[in-house]
Image: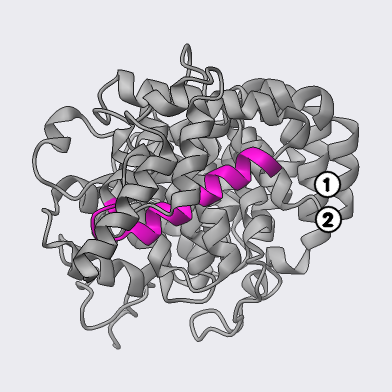
Amino acid sequence: MPPPPPPPRLLAGGDHHPSPTSPSSPEHSLLSAHLQLPSPSTSDLFSPHLPHALAFSFLTHPSPLPRRLLVVLHAAGARFPAFYPSFATALLSLPFPVLLPHPRTRLLVAAAELTRAAAPGFAALLLSLLRRVPFPGDARLLQLIREHSSFLASEEPQLLASAVFAFLRLLSRNRLAPFPRSSAECSNCQECNNAENLEECGKELVSFCVSVLRDHSQVCALIGRDLVRSLHELVLVPEFQGLWKDLMPSRCVEIVGVGTPGWCTALAISPEMETQLLFLMKNVKWGSQKRYQLWFARRHLMVPGGEERIPDIVRFICCGYHPKNEVIQSGVIARWAVIGWLLTSCSKAYIVANAKLALFYDWLFFDESKGNIMNIEPAMLLMVNSVSQYVDITNMLLEFLFLLIENYEVRRKEAIAQCVRCAFTVLVKKGVVPSLDLLTCCEKLAPLLRQKLVEFLSSTSPVAAVEACGKPIDEVSEAADLKKRVLSN
């Protein structure tokens, strides 16, 4: 009698991956439960192995999915309140990037079932999937959220806002690229072959975002000012043009006054990116960062569409990670240094511009009474710490900041200028930098930029332009020129 066939795999194998039977394998807990309950039924409701065994059956059973598995899922969930979260946790325990095509398709089916039942744990599962877009078959996720948008608006508003922001960032990055469909693991699986990608339904994606923004604007306001930043990037899309004219003039000032929460900025990067960035900023000492940066770049930036994520990474570093004083004083690489490296990694001018906007965005609307100084700190420290060796970076950032003040929103130019002045003042007041003399009296800065900075900071007081650094900017420039002439002779 031939031996029984081995259980189906969940993850893509390889020499560097542990065997599914190894305790170190992410598949191990599900496979072990499957061996205990190879065919889950309602008679197994009291088994402690049921959540993992049912998750394994859900992900691996050939198409179509048997109705009995749905019966077991909802019977166990109705009888035991903790079953649904345990089932969702089992699904989330698998590393998504190496999930095989059939289990990945079935993961969306499981998410749909949990959502329809409003089961505890469904929100975490959907949120995890939103952080993975784009991926093959992701159109199912859009359809699922669209189908339940009214329910989510009332019961899980943060999840609906997260979906809108994730899809807006996807549209902004223009990463609706086709994915390969062929796969040896499910070449005969109609369920996988029929799965659509978001790149095939771009109009539906735009329609969903616009409809939710119109019908649930208060929910979308949870995103904060990055909602306006994303819509600005999409203003040339006709559907968003109409939305901007109808809604945003009356809501824009209110929305930009709300800082973007950290959970929102994390949505625009993958969990792997977040983990590796946090490791870099929490554990890597100054002088040892280059090999980690190169490893990160090869894995996430030197891939198709990778560079387009740099502005979102900058926003995450500014708003999503605020290190404690113990970390800041431990000698690890600082946030501003990571952002400086990212800026110099950009090869496309429009990505550099978007990354600089991401860096300064909170400056444009900073309010001392409710603004978080940690959001504006990296830009200031990057400008100040670049002066000695990389003054071109300081010049570039200051020039861009003045361009933003003048042109970002012309009708509110004075209000934006006041917010930027407030940001400079608070950064000195809170001790982020000891004085603005580091910039206003810096001879390495471009003279015109330095003069413009002094005049900008002292615009409320005509005398302050002289007092800002002890002497007029022309006198400073003349002294610098004289010094150069003496040295040259």
The structure residue drawn at horizontal position 50% and vertical position 60%, both measured from the top left corner, is: 309
Q: For this rendering, which residue is in front, 420 or 20?
A: 420
Say above or below: 433 vs 207: above
Q: How far apart are marks 1 and 2 (CA)?
A: 5 Å
- Circle 2: is it few (<14), some (14-19), or many (20+) Cα within 10 Å? few
Q: Which colour scheme is used?
A: one colour
Magenta segment: does it hold 399?
A: yes
Residue 351 position, x and y percent, is 55, 63
User: Mark 2 and mark 1 in contact (Cβ < 8 Å)?
Assistant: yes
Left or right of 194 on screen, residue 28: left
Please state which amino acid type lies under the numbered disc 1.
Phe
Span highlighted in magenta in the image:
386-407
Asked if one can make out residue 41 in the rendered structure from this viewpoint, the answer is: no
Query: Residue 472 occupies which quadrant of the picture?
Result: top left
- Circle 1: is it few (<14), some (14-19), or many (20+) Cα within 10 Å? many
Residue 440 position, x and y percent, is 37, 38
The structure residue drawn at horizontal position 17% and vertical position 29%, both measured from the top left corner, is: 325
Left or right of 137 on screen, residue 74: left
| Residue labelled with disc 2 | 237
Asked if one can make out residue 325 in the rendered structure from this viewpoint, the answer is: yes
Disc 1, SS: helix
| Residue labelled with disc 1 | 240
Please state which amino acid type lies under the numbered disc 2.
Val
Say above or below: 468 vs 360: above
